[in-house]
Amino acid sequence: MRVGIVTIQKNRALWIPEWIAFHHLAGIERFYFYAHNCTDETTEVLQKLAHFYDIKVFAMNLDQDRVQLHVYKHAYDNFGHECDWFAFIDCDEFLFPVADPTIGKALERFTYEKVSAIGVYWSCFGSSGHINEPAGLITKNYRYRRSFDALPNRHVKSIVRGRQVVEAGPNAHIFNTLYGTVDENFRSINKGLTDYDPTYQYLRINHYICQSVEYFRKIKQRSGAADASLARVRPDAYWAEHDHNDVFDDSLEAWYPKLEAEIERIGFSEFAGQIAGGLRWLEPVLSPDADDPTELLKQILNATTYFEKKLEAGEELDKALVNEYYKVQKAFYKKMKTTTDNENLVLGYGKMVELIGLVGREFDAEKFKQVLAMANQYLKAFT
């Protein structure tokens, strides 16, 4: 069973690696990521994550209200055939199985039932007393939540069966479907805020709705609402309404070791959640021995961006990494020669590769900037 996630996120670069890694461990196989009006490093983060996970990325600069419903419609209309189930959740929501190893395994209970979507209940978390945004994992930093019987926890988010005719809306919580939506108890749901007490027997969404005071003031308060008005400013009363820390929660205790190991595997350990972070997290993974020219091209694109940002920041480059970049460029050039009929392109690219080797041996930042500009120019022919 293949399960995918559709999400729309804005300026969440610092927390995307944890969110993707967590859901990968929970059994999500494919991500449909809509980056909406992002001005941070979301694109660069997703480029690196694409080396490890199956992610389709869509950069959007739409200034329209209720853009989230537009995104959900686009995703399902175009990719609804690719997965058996699709979870439609936000950047601060972490969906996981309670009694099973994966989300897919939990959903097997509904495979042969005449239902189109499953509503999964929120469990809302407060700030855990954090004034400043702490480095590290959201799921580990924020351990205090509201009691389960609190009204906001009656909200659900939908996991929708694939290969159907569905319509997003009337809000981001619920869909219009052929056979309707039920919760894990098979109680019928027709609105985002249900009339039922929530249960968490099989599936659960930890909703980190607050994070820290710093995060709320700097980012969330004026970020708009993707399912309503982009101009929305959350009043201070919003914070007071949601910052409840009634119960210590250990629901993800068993997840921390494997999540931290996964974050380390993909190279984001020192980056997670740091509002003032450097560029080390962006360091490319270079493998000149890759057989696939598309994979080599991805490495070149990521490395070129990385080197440009390092030089712009006035930081020194690792000469060993520059040498690996040269090897990858050389490997790509060899494969390109056999597949490209454009002799001028082949000749020019070959000269550029030679230049990278020369500049790498006797490193000169200004010359390397020129080489990177040439690389970007040539790379346009392949992207």
Image (cartoon, rainbow, N blue to C red):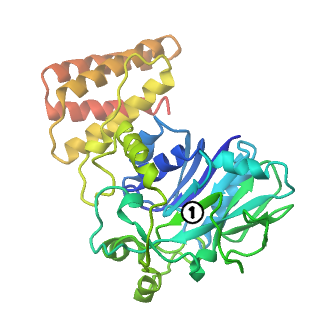
In percent of width and height, residue 276 lies at: 24, 59
Q: Which residue is mark 1?
A: 205
Indicate the quadrant where residue 180 lies: bottom right
Q: Residue at x 79, y 65 (%)?
A: 186
> Is residue 90 something that shows in the picture?
yes
Q: Is residue 193 left or right of residue 166?
A: left
Q: Is residue 306 left or right of residue 169?
A: left
| Above or below 198: residue 320 | above
Q: Secondary structure at mark 1?
A: strand
Q: Residue at x 74, y 47 (%)?
A: 108
Q: Residue at x 30, y 35 (%)?
A: 373
| Above or below 20: residue 266 | above
Q: Residue at x 48, y 49 (%)?
A: 22
| Above or below 54: residue 11 | below
In percent of width and height, residue 49 lies at: 44, 41
Q: Quadrant of the N terminus?
A: top right
> Is residue 89 something that shows in the picture?
no
In percent of width and height, residue 357 lies at: 23, 18
Q: Is residue 364 left or right of residue 106?
A: left
Q: Is residue 112 left or right of residue 128?
A: right
Front residue (pair 297, 246): 246
Residue type marked 1: Ile
